[in-house]
Image (cartoon, rainbow, N blue to C red):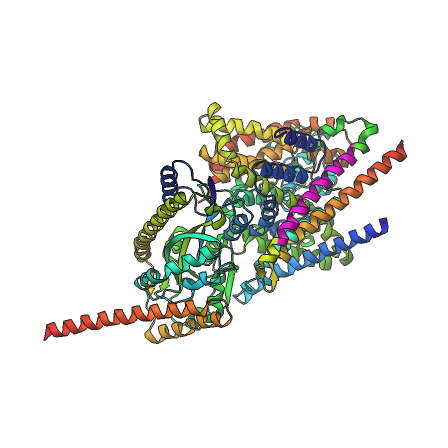
Amino acid sequence: VTLKVATISPEGSSWMKSMRASAKEIEKKTEGRVKIKFYTGGVMGNDQAVLKKIRFRQLQGGALTSSSLANTYPDSQLYTLPMVFRDQEEIDYVRAKLDQELLQGYEDNGFVVFGFAGGGFAYLMSKDPLKTIDDVRSHKVWIPSNDKAASEIVKAFDINPIPLSLGDVLPSLQTGIIDTVATSPIAAIALQWHTQVKYVIDLPILYIYAYFTVEKKAFNKLKPDDQKIFKAVMTNTFREINEKNKTENEAAKQALVNFGIEYIQPADVDRQAWYKIAAQVGPNMVEQGRISADLFAKLNQVIEEYRQQSNQTVNNAATTQSTASN
Amino acid sequence: MEWLLPVIIILLGLSGLPLYIVIVSLAMWGFYLAEIDLFVIAIEIYRLTDIPILSALPLFTFAGYLLSESKTSERLVAVSKALLGWLPAGLAIVTLLVSAIFTAFTGATGATIVALGALLYPALVSEGYRENFSLGLVTTSGSLGLLIPPALPLILYGVIAQQLDLEIQFTLQDLLVAGIIPALLMVFLLSVWAVVSNRQQTSQRVSFSWQRLGQAAKQSAWELPLVPLVLIGVYSGFFTLSEIAVISCVYLIIVEVFVYKEIPVKRLTTIGSQAMVMSGGIMIVLAVSLALANWMVDQSLPQQLFEWTKQYVDDKLSFLILLNIILLVLGAVLDIFSALVIMVPLILPVAASFGIHPVHLGIIFLANMQIGYLTPPIGMNLFIASYRFGKPIGEIFRSVVPFILLLLLALLMITYIPQLSLMFVG
Amino acid sequence: MQRLLNQLHRIEQGILWLMLVALIAAGLLQVILRNVFDTGILWNETLIRVLVLWLTLLGALCATVDNRHIKINIFDRLIPKPFISHWQSFLHLVSASVCFLVAYYSFGFVLEEYSYGEIAFGVVPVWVTESIIPIGFGLMGLRFAIQMVTCLTVSKEVN
Ligand code: NA
Ligand code: NA
C-alpha cells in the first residue's frame, strides 16, 4: 500500500528529513507493504486544499497545523485558545495529561493522528515597544486572512487587523503597510520578518503545533500488524520532533536577542489585563457550543493543578531557603 | 487506449479545439488512469482562490482596455516625439519606447499594433523611413515590453512558478524588477539598428523645443502619472500589485470617462465585459492547467523528465542551449499563455535542478516567447499586422527578419549573462 | 429560442460587469481601509479571490458564446473547405461533452461540500462559492452543444 501525503514543508527541511527517515523505517519494518509518497512544498495546496483532497481520496494524509481540522473536530481547538498557557512547562504538563484524549477525538472523527509537534508560542512582534492592549490597538497589526484561531484573538482583544496573505507580509513590514505581527520566533526567522521588527512582547499568545494525519479509512486498510508498526514509528518520530523543537524554540528566542531584538516585559497590571480578556474566549466558545464544556473544564482543572503544584514547589523552595538561612 | 486518447486530444488541440478543453480532458484522463477521483478537477479549479495576486490579472486587463479605447496612444506618441524626436532615427526610437510601455499595460494582445502601429506606420513612411523597415518595426514593437511590469505574462509566470516547490524562493517583486534591464537591452539593440539602417535616409530631424514638449505633456498630463505610479508602486513595494491594479483601474475610469470624456459611461459596461471575456479566457486555461500540473506532480513527471534530460545533457550551459531551442520551437507554434501554463510546471523544476534561478528562467522564457510572436506558423504579431496593414503574411515576415535576428542576439545575452536579470534580486 | 439565448447572454454579460465592479469596489475598500484607516476587513481578501474565480468562469462562458477561446490552429488548414463546418461541429461536440463531464463531477463535488457545511467568509458557505464551477461548465457545455447544431444546419444550407 502506498499512502500519498502532502505537506507545505519544502524538501530538505529538517521536518521532511525526519518524515522521510520514518517513512523508510516503516517501509523496512513492514517489509515493503507500507510506503509513503510525499508531496512537499505545498504543491497540493494549503491545509484546506489538502483536507479536500483527503476527503476526495486523492491523498490519504497530510501534515497539518494547529486548528486546521476545527470544522471536523471542534475540540481540536483546545490548545489554540489564546493565552491559556503561560510557558512551555505548563503546556508540557497539560499535554501529558490531555494529548491521549485529543488523539482519540481525532480518531473518532476519522483522522488518525500520531502526536503533536509543538512549534513554540506566537508572540507579538513590532517595530515599536508595545506593552498594553491599547498600544497594540493603535498599531497596524497583521493577521493571516481567514485563520480561525487568529480571528478569535483579534475579536477578543478588539484589535483592527490588516489581513494580508503570507507572501505579502515581509514587503508590507518593509514599507510600513503593517508594523506588528504575531508569530513564533522560529517562523519569524525563517520568513525573515525578524529583520523588520525591533521588539517582542514577552507574553505567549498562542500555542502553535503541527501534526501528521492519515485518514482513518485508509489507515484501516493496512494490516493490523502494519498499523501497529506505523503508529509506533510515527508516534516516536513526533515525540522526537516535539523535543527537538523545544530546543530549537529556545535557540530561536535567543537568536532574536542576538539579532538585537528586545523582549519587552509588560507590567503586572498590563499582563493581568491581557489574561483577563483572553480568559473570556474559552467560556464564550463553550457557550456557543464550539468547544465541549467537559473538555474545557478538564483543561482548566489540569492547569490549576499544575499551577498549585508549581506554587507549592516555589513555596517549598522558599521555605527550604528561609530554613537554610535560619 | 492509454496513449491513443491523449494523442487524439492533442491532435484535436492542434486543429482548433479550445485549449482549456484540451488541458482539462488530458488532466481528467490522467487522473482516471491514476485511479484518482475526478472530483479532484473541481478542487484544482477552486485552487484559483489560493493565489493571492490573481486579481491583478483581470484588473490590469481592464486597465489595458480602457487605455486602448481612448486616444492615449496619440498623446503618448506626441510626448515622446517632443522628447526624443531630435535624435537620429528619432521617430523609430519613439516607436520602440512607446510600444514597450503600451504593451506592458495592454499585455501584448495586439492592441499595440492596432492602436499604435496604425498611427506610427504612416508617420514613419511619410518621414522617409523605408517601407519594409517601418513595417518590421511596428510589427516587432507589438510585443516589446513583455518584460516590463505590469505585463500580464510576467505576472502569470510568477503565479505559476510560485505554485511549485522550488528550492530557490523568490518574490513577485524580484521577478518584476528582473525584466527591466533585459527589456531596455532589447530596446537599445533595436534602436541602434534603427539608426544604423537609416543612416542614408534624410528624414526630418525635428529640433527639440521646450514649448512643444510642454504642450504635449499638458495634453496627456492626466495619463502620464500612471507610468511612474505603477513603476514606483511596484518597485517601492508601498502598494501590493493587486492594489496598484485597483488604483490604475479607478484612476483610468476617472481620467478617460470624466476628464478626457473619450469613453462614454454607457460604453464602460461593454468594455468591462469584453475585458473580462479576455481575462476569463486566460484564467480558465490557468485554472485547468493547475489540475494538469497537479497530475504531472502526482505522477512525478518533472523528476522523470529531469532524469531523461540528464542522459543527454549534463551541464548548465548545454541545458540552456537546449532550452532556447525548445522554447523557440514552442514559441513558433504556441501562443504565450498556452506555452506558459503548459511548459512552466514541466520545465521549471528541471531547470532548477540544473541550478538556473527561477527568475532568470522566467525572463529567458518570456524573451523566447517574444520572438515567438514574430515566427510562423503561429505568430500573433504577423497575423495582426497583416490584417491591420493589409499586407500578405510573407511580406510582413520578410520585414521582421532583421529584427528577429537582433532579438535573438538579445536573447543570447539574456540567457548566458544571468546578471542582466538577477542584478537586483535577493 | 435564439431570442432566449441572446437574453441569457446579455444577462451573463451584465453579471460579468457587476462582478468586475464588485472586484474594483472590494479592492478599493481594501486600499482605503489600509492606507487611510490602518485597518482591514477580515473576509474582504477571501471575497476578492472568490470574485476572481467567478469572473474566470463567467468570462470563459462569455468567451464560449463569442467564440473567443484560446486555440491553436495549425492543422485545421488541412481540412478541405466543404467539410469545415462539419469539422467545427465535431469540435463543438467534443467540447460540449468534456464540459458536461466536468460539470457532472464538480456538481458531485459541490454536493459533498454542501453536506460538509464549511463557511467561506461572513455567512457565505464554501459550497456556494464553489457552485460556479458546475454552473459555468454546464452552461459552457450547453453553448457548445447549441453551436454544434448551428454549424450542422449551416453546412446543410450550404450543401
Ligand atoms: Na504565492
Ligand atoms: Na510564433
Residue C25 placement: quadrant? bottom right
Q: Is residue B400 visible?
A: yes
Q: Position of residue A285 (x, y in %)?
A: 48, 69
> What residue is rendered at 56% in x and 48% in y?
A56
Along the horizontal axis of the image, is A1 left or right of C61? left
Up the image or down, B192 lies above or below C67; here it is: above
Which residue occupies the foreground of this view, A300 or B209?
Answer: A300
- Residue C97 is inside the magenta segment: yes
Which of the image's four quarters has the C terminus of chain A?
Answer: bottom left
Residue C129 placement: quadrant? bottom right
Up the image or down, A183 lies above or below B122; here it is: below
Q: Name the residue at the front extreme.
A: A224
Up the image or down, A305 lies above or below B198; here it is: below
Q: Is residue B216 visible?
A: no
Which residue occupies the foreground of this view, B320 or A109?
Answer: A109
Q: Position of residue A288 (x, y in %)?
A: 51, 71
Q: Which residues are magenta?
A: C87-111
Main SS, magenta region, reads helix
Which residue occupies the foreground of this view, A174 or A205?
Answer: A205
- Residue A178 is inside the magenta segment: no
Along the horizontal axis of the image, is A325 left or right of A84? left
Q: Position of residue B201 (x, y in %)?
A: 69, 30
Along the horizontal axis of the image, is B37 left or right of A189? right
Number of numbered tags placed on the structure image: 0
Q: Name the residue at the left extreme.
A: A326
Residue B406 placement: quadrant? top right
Q: Position of residue A209 (x, y in %)?
A: 40, 56
